[in-house]
Image (tube, rainbow, N blue to C red):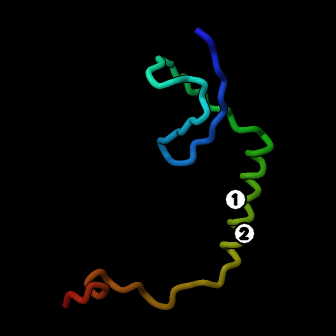
């Protein structure tokens, strides 16, 4: 059995699409999926982005004024 190593990115939850494989319809293949661990650099950038987001959220002046309407008020069920 020959081995072909292909790297792909999951673009939708639960879906992986592979194109350009050197196999034909009816060929029997075995797929083994291996997740590449995140690099320390990517994890560091992610943490920095989360910190920036939290800081922006803390500085936000958006606030609700008064209590939220009840479910009945929202759906006019009086």
Residue sitting farthest toward the left = 78
- The quadrant of the image that shows the N terminus is top right
**Residue at horizontal 47 percent and vertical 42 percent from the top:** 14
- The quadrant of the image that shows the C terminus is bottom left
**Residue at horizontal 25 percent and vertical 89 percent from the top:** 76
- Give the SS element for disc 2: helix
What residue is disc 1 on?
A: 50
Residue 21 drawn at (x, y percent): 60, 28
Residue 55: which disc?
A: 2
Compared with 24, 52 (above or below) is below
Q: On the image, which quarter does residue 33 sit in? A: top right
**Residue at horizontal 71 percent and vertical 72 percent from the top:** 56
Residue 13 drawn at (x, y percent): 49, 46
5 left or right, relative to 26? right
Crowding at dot 2, Cα within 10 Å, few <14 / some 14-19 / many 20+, comes out as: few
Query: Front-most of 74 and 15?
Result: 15
Query: Front-most of 69 and 75?
Result: 75
Residue 15: which disc?
A: none
Give the Cα separation between the discs numbered 2 and 1: 9 Å
């Amino acid at each position: 059995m020959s081995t072909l190593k292909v790297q792909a990115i999951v673009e939708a939850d639960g879906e992986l699409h592979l194109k350009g494989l050197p196999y034909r319809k009816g060929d029997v293949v075995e797929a083994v999926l291996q997740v590449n661990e995140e690099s320390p650099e990517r994890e560091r950038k992610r943490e920095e982005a989360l910190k920036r987001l939290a800081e922006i959220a803390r500085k936000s002046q958006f606030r609700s004024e008064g209590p939220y309407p009840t479910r009945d008020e929202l759906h006019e069920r009086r």
